[in-house]
Amino acid sequence: MTSVGSSAVPAARAGSGRAALGARAERVLRTSWLGPALSGLGRWLGLLAAVVLALRLGAGSAASGGTSGPLASPASAADLSVAAVLALRLVPALVLGPLAGRLAARWDHRTTAVAADLVRAALLVSVPLVGTLPWLLAAVLLVALVGLLRAAAEEATSADLPAERRAAAERLRLRAATGSLPVAALLFVVLAALSQATTGAASTLPFHAAALAHVLAAVVAWRSWPARRAVPAAAERPAGPLGALAPGWRALASAPRGRGLVVLVLAALAAGAAAVGAAPAHLEALDAGAPGLGLVVAGVATGLLLGAWTGPRLLVALVRWRLALLAAVVAGVLLVPLALVPDLVVVALLGVLVGACGGVAWVTGSALVGLEVADGARELTRAALLAAARVVLVAVVVLVPALAALVGRRALALTDETTVALDGAVPALLLAALLVVGAALLASRRVDDGASGALLPDLVRAWRLRHSAHAEPPARPTGGFLVALEGGDGVGKSTQARALAQWLGQLGHDVVVTREPGATEAGRAIRAVLLHGGDLAPRAEALLYAADRAQHVAELVRPALEQGALVITDRYVDSSVAYQGAGRDLVAEEVAGISTWATQGLLPDLTVVLDLPADRARARLGDQLDRLEREPLEFHEAVRQRFLTLARRTPRRYLVVDADAAPEEVARRVRAGLEPLLPPSPAERARRAAEVEAAERFRREAERVRAQAEQDAREVAEAARRAEGERREAQRARTREEKDVARSEARERSEAARARAVADREETQRLREEQAEADRLDAERAERAGREEAEREEAVRLDAERAAAEREALALRDRESTQPIAVPGQGPAERTRQMPAVGSHRALDEELFSLGDPDDTEWPR
């Protein structure tokens, strides 16, 4: 019980560890391109901005008397400043790479990367703020040193990944870092123009943009990189570019052609580096400014990528080493017009062509170098080639502006009246062109195999066949997988075919093993004629092989492929090209054309060339030899070299295996080269189909659940909309009712107000009418009172007049008839008064008893 438990726990831990490693590997692969792309963008933007600022500060320092001697001119000082910036930025990566790797391995990778990016961002922002040449050089050096730590931490993130995932991560990082150069150069063109227009300095905005790119790279590293502290073994620590040169160069010691190919590649890359290194001085003389520099650098970088992409497809009928040679020579020759033409657009286009030549030479030459060494030394050779390329690029980019600074501006007198002003970049580019072309021509003497014929006819033939010759086999509409085992007689093809079929059968593949000639009934008759018959003309021999191949493909190979089988054929089209093309001195393209027609363009997915010197292969054959096996050693050696030439021409379709080893070792090498290309076996396809079906079922179920959820959500939403509509309708009903009540009340209030207004108007009218009637009555009373008053006055007057008249009459009568009357008891005076006459009694009665005005109290006297 204890042993079971103790074994189960480590197993569980191992399983969880593998799961965690797998998740981490996937995360690293997903993000392995973004961080290097942002970091590379900041690196190239910062470098271009530093070069532009160095031009301005160097020229200003010389103009102010800061330099003396042969470099006292502003142009020379500017070029020397550029060379110093490039040297401080690029050289530390060659020398201090291993030290940075050992330091970064002892620190947390994520923290190191984030800190390095933030420090670089701060340094780049400080450069335009300080604006002095010493601080520019110091900041460039510090950025380079911190960048080494960042690169080492970046490489260490994938140190514990599986080999294939680590290789994939490395490829993604390399492509991202390389692809960021043209993007950075084009972005620099835009930013430099905007910065010049806004701030007056072309490098300000590029510095800030570079700092921003580094900050974003830090964010990506912090969010996606796993935190890990580990010290790798000493063998896993990076050796740096210089440390990788010696082992790879020693691996090429037994392959002189490989060394020649390396020189071709480096010469073509040096041409592109010379164009970039001379660009600041050359464009400064052309008054192209910072945007011109970015345009030329973008052209060279874009051309390099285009050349690497089109290299395998370019003139595929041309021998590959000749294509690399042609690319190197053309790159060197193009440096001459690039130096002499004073036009920015032409210079940029020439830069694209120079970069394209470098890309073609790189992809072609690096593939050929791998074929020149043994399988175990290929990784060392590729590492050495990459290291040598970095060293050459840095050296040329630094030395060209330094040479331009030493030469300075010169006036070339063509005649007594004509002089031409030449900047220092012109002689530097011309010298670089001479060295590149010379190195390429010297290297061609090493790589020439002596079997390719004259260059011009070969080039013309390759141009004529550019549409009919393919580096890759044409797309086959059927399934299956076709493997062809090729090589001279006695190399062990039949043995390897059986071993390969056994291994593939164990993997679950449907395997069909066949051979040429003689796999069909007609083919057996042709085989008897070819191998055991009399002498045949070379053309008849080639046609018989083509006839056997046509029947072989139609009857056996194509039907097996259509059924999804994996077909292993002992010899195929390349045997005719090698034996009849090289051994019988027929035109190889014609032999290949016959076989292509016979097979309807069916080419192998992989051709395994078992390589063995002819004398050693002859020793394996024994005494029973057929007609071809009895050919001399020169024939078989020519056949062997043609096989190798075919492999060098289209290396992506060939696997060259050294057959001078034990059969088990040769079989292991064949399996190692074939395994990455194999299609899945029927069992694997069934398993994948089951997985796909399960995934499809899961997808459909998830789709159904999602559709149901969406339906439910729609129903809920519809119910909610209905409830909301009802609520709004009820609210609208309540609102309408309230509005109706309010309108009714308002109407009633309005009617009451109108009634009150009417009543008020009627009351006002009544009052007005009453007032008018009262006024009329008052006026009538006043008028009547006035008339009455007037009548009374008139009556009073008349009465007064009548009374006066009467009094006058009475007085007159009294005086005439009145006698004194004695009253007893009175004195004589009292008894004496005037009494009216008898005739005046009526008048006195009227006075006493009249109905006249009571206010008239005046008595007559």
Image: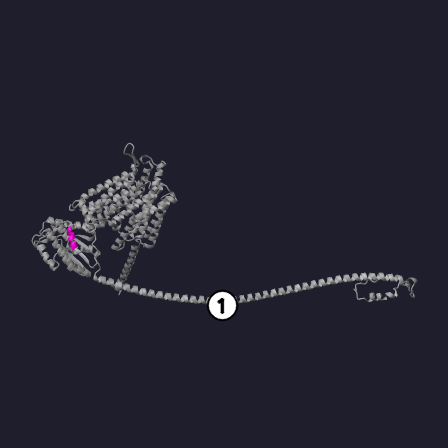
In the orientation shown, which residue stands out farthest toward the left?
A: 534
**x%, y% of residue 560?**
17, 60
**x%, y% of residue 40?**
31, 49
Classify the position of the C terminus by image quarter. bottom right
**Left or right of 112 on screen, residue 374:** left
Name the residue: 11% across, 48% down.
634
Q: Is residue 793 above or below residue 341?
A: below
Neighbours of disc 1 within 10 Å: few (<14), some (14-19), many (20+): few
Residue 123 visible in rendering: no
- Amino acid under disc 1: Glu
Instruction: Name the one closer to the observer, 330 or 642.
Output: 330
**Left or right of 836 on screen, residue 460:** left
**x%, y% of residue 704?**
32, 65
**Left or right of 238 on screen, residue 755:** right
Instruction: Name the one closer to the observer, 371 or 120.
Output: 371
**x%, y% of residue 632?**
9, 49
Q: How many marks?
A: 1
**Span of residues in magenta:** 590-597
Residue 134 visible in rendering: yes
Which residue, given by chain and number where applicable, does mark 1 sit on? 737
Element carrying mark 1: helix
Instruction: Name the one closer to the observer, 277 or 535.
Output: 535
Name the chief secondary structure element in magenta: helix
